[in-house]
Amino acid sequence: MKKRWNIYKNMMSGVSQLLPFVVAGGIFISLSFLIDSSFSNSPIALWFNDTGTLIMGLLLPVLGGFIAYAIADKPGLVPGFVAGALATTGNSGFLGALIGGFVAGYITLLLIKIFSKLPRVLHGLNPMLIFPVLGTLFVALIMIGVNIAVEPVTTAVQAFLSNLNGVGAILIGLIAAGLMAIDLGGPVNKITYMIGIASIIGGSQSILMAAIMVGGMIPPLGIAGATLLFKNKFNEKERQLGKKNWAMGSIFITEGAIPFTEDGPKITIPILVIGSALAGALVGLFQTSIAIPHGGIFVIAFMHNWWGFVIALVSGMIATSILLGLFLPSKQE
């Protein structure tokens, strides 16, 4: 029962199920733009765009459905999917689906408790009739209020992110990328990443998402570079781990940096944050954006102003490696 009230884990359960849909939809839509830029009005480009748009249309129902599933198991799926669908039609977006998923899950839990008192012979009605129908009815009514309250917020945030430029883009990129390095895969990292995902719902290109991706790649890559350039700062085990960080950083797995923060976090973490923040600021400066939430170097081709991402990535990595080399104490084998 305890897991049902763990808000963070339930939220991340929905986000983890959402992720493959975002990747697939984002790549399809990006491919449509790449093809259309070479072959104008191509039927193939149109097909990729339509399919990608269809996939993106499933995102919020999947989010709401699997948050509800994490809370109430299978009985929560239908009300949760409906909550996400209503967030889509009601324009309350990611936040509306997030709230709707929790509402659906906890309403379903309440129904399970109430109807557990029915005679055992009637229990067969619960999963096929009572939970999906009553659960959906209550959730649909509550989502009217959720959509009314959340839609203006969602619209304002989307307008702000779609018009990011100049100092604003640099500042947002700097902050978002820096947050990715604070706990290297912990709650701050994951919540920041979730906000990035919210910015690309619908297939939109997002500077914020590009900054978050580069911010998550810098820690492992910067450490990998430091273990290569400043061997005396690391023991043999760390140098071997550093080799693995080339691969982990390249595909946007921030957690590869964690073992290197255990001995001296007061030195290492601020340096990683500085390197990531620098890279994120450069992404904002160069107006680099992406509609795909994962993949690292394998999705650079799908970025708008992809060269800005490369410059930011290399700059942040070099800065991180040099700072680690300068400030970490030498180690004796």
Image (cartoon, grey):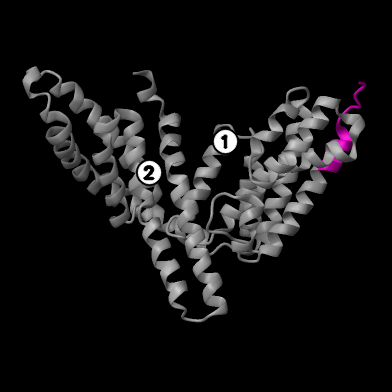
Residue 275 is situated, as x and y percent measured from the top left of the image, at 75, 45
Residue projecting furthest to the front = 44
* Quadrant housing the N terminus: top left
Question: Magenta region: which residues?
Answer: 321-333
The amino acid beneath tag 2 is: Leu
Please report the residue visible at 50 percent of the width from the left and 44 percent of the height from the top: 194
For label 1, the residue is 188
Please report the residue visible at 46 percent of the width from the left and 39 percent of the height from the top: 16
| SS at circle 2 | helix
Name the quadrant containing residue 326: top right
Please report the residue visible at 86 percent of the width from the left and 30 percent of the height from the top: 328
Name the quadrant containing residue 190: top right
For label 2, the residue is 63
**Foreground residue, 28 or 289?**
28
Residue 214 is situated, as x and y percent measured from the top left of the image, at 66, 50
The amino acid beneath tag 1 is: Val
Residue 226 is situated, as x and y percent measured from the top left of the image, at 84, 39
Q: Is residue 261 left or right of residue 66?
A: right
